[in-house]
C-alpha cells in the first residue's frame, strides 16, 4: 500500500467513510474529523510510518505539519519520512 | 441548622516550596517551579518539563517501614497534613475523633508505585513484587494513613474527579461540617504522576507544552504537570471560636456541575453553572468577588472557555475582578491542584496579595480579563473563588470569605 493509500485508509477509518469517498482536496472539516479524531489520526500515522509528527492540539494549524487537506497531510508525511528514515 | 465552616490549618509541599510560607513567598515573587524533569527514562519522553518537587529525600521524613507503605503521593499528603495539624493545634480523642474525618482528592493515587512495579514484572521479567504494593498504590492510601496518624475516626474517603478531585473533596468536607455530620474535616489533595508512564500517557493527548505553562497568553501552547499536596483543616466555626483557634478564612460556599457533553472539551455552560452555583450557595452577590484562582491550564481550549464563563456569570464586574492561574508557577497537580491553589486564595484574603499569572507574553482577545500578568499585586479582597474543571466535564468551585 502506498503512503497515500495508507493515509487515506487511516483518515477514512476516523471519518467512518469508505476510502473511495475521500478526495485529495477534502479538508478535515469536510470529512467530519474533530479534534479527538485528529489526535487519533496523527497517532495512527506515527505508528504506520514509524515517524514523529510535530503536532500540538493547542495550535493545530500553526504547527509545521500542514493539516489543511488530505493532500497536504500526505505531502507532510512524505517529507517526515524522508527526514526521519 | 447550617453551621459556618472555617479553615484553621494549612500545609503543602509542591514545586514552589516545602511548606506554606515558602510557597506563598514564591507566589509573591512570581517564581517558576517548573523545570527539567529528573526521572528515569526522561530521554524517551517528548515532554521533559514539570513542576517537580526537587531535592526531596523521603528518608529524611519517614522510616523504612513507612516508605514500604507510603507512595510518593501519600508521603506528600502526610507532610502537608503534619503542617496543617500543627497549625490548627487540634488533637483528636474521644467524641471529637469520632466526629472528624478525612476527605482527599487524587487522580492517579500511587501511580509511581504502579509504574515501578509494572516495569519490574514486564520489563525486567521479575515474577515477584513486594507484599505491600496494593496498600501502597491504592487511591485511598493517603486518606487512610492520615486517619491513622491523627486518629480521625469519622467519615473518610477519597475523591477522584481528575483535575477537580481536590475541589470536589474540599466541597464534601465543607458540606459535612456545615450540615453537622462532622466537627472537623481534614481535606485537600495530592498527586504524584511525574513518572515515565504518567507523563507518557499525557503526551498522547497532544495538549502538553514542551517549554512553559503560559495561561491566558496568546502564545500559550499547553499544560505542564506538577506534583505535590495541599491539606487543610476545615472546622465548625463555633468549635474553632470556642477554643480560640487562629482562623485563616471562612469557607463560604461550594457548587459542582457536570457538562454532560464531551470527555475532554470543556463547556462554558458547565463552568458557568458551577461558578454561579458557588455564589448562590454562599449567598454572595457576584460583585463581591475580588479574585478568582482560575483553573487556567494554559491549553487553548480551557482558558478561552473559562474566561467566557466568567464573563457570562459576572457581566460588567468581570472587568473589575482579578483572575490568575498559579499553574504557571507550580504546574498542574491534577488531583491535587485545587488544594495547592487554595493557598493563593487564602493569601489573597489574609495577606492582601494576589498571585500572578507568570509566563504571560501577549494578550489574547478571547481571554480579555485582568489576569494579573507576571507580577503579584497588592489588593484588599473580601471574597475569592477557586475554579476547577476536570476532564470528563466535572466542575467544582469553592467560595472563600475573609473573617
Image: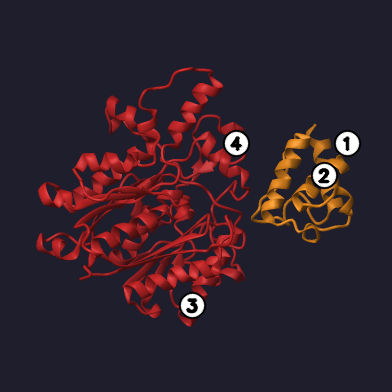
Sequence-first disc among 1 and 2: 1
| Residue that badge 4 annotates | B45
Rendered residue at 39%/80% (across/down): B287
Q: Distance between the residues labelled 3 and 2?
A: 49 Å
Q: Can the viewer see residue B393?
A: yes
State left or right for residue A47 relative to residue B355.
right
**How many angstroms separate mark 2 from mark 4 (CA)?**
28 Å
In this rendering, the label closer to the viewer, 3 or 2? 2
Q: What element carries label 1?
A: loop
- Labels 2 and 4 share a subunit: no
Image location of residue B127, percent across then percent down: 48, 17
Quarter holding the N terminus of chain A is top right
Tags 3 and 2 both on a single chain? no
Residue holding disc 1: A1
User: Which residue is rendered at x = 45% and y = 52% of the image?
Assistant: B161
Chain letter for the orange colouring in the rendering: A
Disc 2 residue crowd, few under 14, some 14–19, many 20+, Cα 10 Å: some
Which label's residue is closer to the chain start, 4 or 3?
4
- Whether pointer 1 and pointer 2 mark residues with C-beta atoms closer than 8 Å, the reply is yes
Q: Which chain carries label 4?
A: B
Q: In this view, does B263 lie to the left or right of B384?
A: right
Other residues around mark 3 within 10 Å, as few (<14) / some (14–19) / many (≥20): some
Q: Which residue is drawn at 14% across and 52% down?
A: B96
Residue B333 shows in this picture: no
The chain displayed red equals B
Label 3 marks a residue whose chain is: B
Q: Nearer the viewer, residue B93 or B319?
A: B93
Q: What is the C-alpha distance between the residues marked 1 and 2?
A: 10 Å
Q: How far apart are marks 4 and 1 (CA)?
A: 31 Å
Label 4: element kind: loop
Amino acid at each position: 500500500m502506498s503512503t497515500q493509500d495508507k493515509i487515506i485508509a487511516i483518515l477514512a477509518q476516523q471519518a467512518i467513510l469508505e476510502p473511495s469517498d475521500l478526495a485529495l482536496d477534502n479538508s478535515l472539516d469536510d470529512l467530519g474529523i474533530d479534534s479527538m479524531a485528529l489526535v487519533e489520526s496523527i497517532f495512527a500515522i506515527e505508528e504506520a510510518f514509524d515517524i514523529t509528527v510535530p503536532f500540538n492540539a493547542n495550535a493545530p494549524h500553526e504547527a509545521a505539519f500542514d493539516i489543511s487537506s488530505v493532500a497536504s497531510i500526505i505531502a507532510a508525511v512524505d517529507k517526515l519520512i524522508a527526514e526521519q528514515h | 441548622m447550617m453551621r459556618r465552616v472555617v479553615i484553621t490549618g494549612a500545609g503543602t509541599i509542591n514545586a514552589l516550596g516545602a511548606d506554606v510560607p515558602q510557597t506563598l513567598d514564591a507566589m509573591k515573587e512570581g517564581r517558576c517551579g517548573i523545570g527539567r524533569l529528573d526521572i528515569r527514562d526522561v530521554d524517551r519522553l517528548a515532554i521533559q518539563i514539570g513542576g517537580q518537587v526537587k531535592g526531596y529525600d523521603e528518608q529524611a521524613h519517614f522510616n523504612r517501614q513507612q516508605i514500604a507503605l507510603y507512595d510518593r503521593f501519600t508521603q506528600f499528603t502526610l507532610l502537608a497534613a503534619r503542617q496543617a495539624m500543627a497549625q490548627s493545634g487540634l488533637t483528636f480523642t474521644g467524641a471529637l475523633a469520632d466526629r472528624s474525618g478525612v476527605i482527599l482528592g487524587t487522580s492517579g493515587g500511587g501511580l509511581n508505585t504502579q509504574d515501578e512495579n509494572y516495569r519490574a514484572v514486564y520489563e525486567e521479567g521479575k515474577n515477584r513484587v513486594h507484599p505491600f504494593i496494593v496498600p501502597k498504590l491504592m487511591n485511598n492510601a493517603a486518606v487512610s494513613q492520615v486517619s491513622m496518624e491523627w486518629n480521625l475516626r469519622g467519615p473518610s474517603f477519597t475523591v477522584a474527579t481528575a483535575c477537580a478531585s481536590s475541589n470536589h473533596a474540599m466541597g464534601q468536607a465543607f458540606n459535612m461540617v456545615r450540615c453537622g455530620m462532622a466537627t472537623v474535616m481534614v481535606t485537600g489533595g495530592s498527586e504524584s504522576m511525574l513518572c515515565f508512564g504518567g507523563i507518557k500517557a499525557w503526551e498522547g493527548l497532544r495538549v502538553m507544552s514542551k517549554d512553559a505553562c503560559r495561561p491566558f497568553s496568546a502564545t500559550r501552547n499547553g499544560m505542564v504537570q506538577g506534583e505535590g499536596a495541599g491539606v487543610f483543616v476545615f472546622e465548625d466555626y463555633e468549635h474553632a471560636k470556642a477554643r480560640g483557634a487562629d482562623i485563616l478564612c471562612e469557607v463560604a460556599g461550594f457548587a459542582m456541575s457536570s457538562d454532560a457533553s464531551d470527555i475532554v472539551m470543556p463547556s462554558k455552560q458547565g463552568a458557568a453553572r458551577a461558578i454561579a452555583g458557588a455564589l448562590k450557595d454562599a449567598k454572595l452577590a457576584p460583585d463581591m468577588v475580588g479574585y478568582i484562582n482560575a483553573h487556567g491550564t494554559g491549553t487553548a481550549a480551557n482558558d478561552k472557555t473559562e474566561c467566557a464563563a466568567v464573563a457570562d456569570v459576572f457581566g460588567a464586574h468581570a472587568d473589575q475582578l482579578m483572575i490568575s492561574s498559579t499553574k504557571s508557577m507550580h504546574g498542574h497537580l491534577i488531583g491535587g491542584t485545587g488544594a495547592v491553589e487554595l493557598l493563593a486564595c487564602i493569601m489573597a484574603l489574609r495577606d492582601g496579595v494576589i498571585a500572578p499569572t507568570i509566563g504571560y507574553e501577549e494578550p489574547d482577545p478571547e481571554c480579555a480579563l485582568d489576569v494579573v500578568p507576571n507580577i503579584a499585586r497588592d489588593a484588599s479582597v473580601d471574597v475569592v473563588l477557586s475554579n476547577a474543571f476536570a476532564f470528563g466535564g466535572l466542575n467544582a468551585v469553592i467560595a472563600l470569605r475573609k473573617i
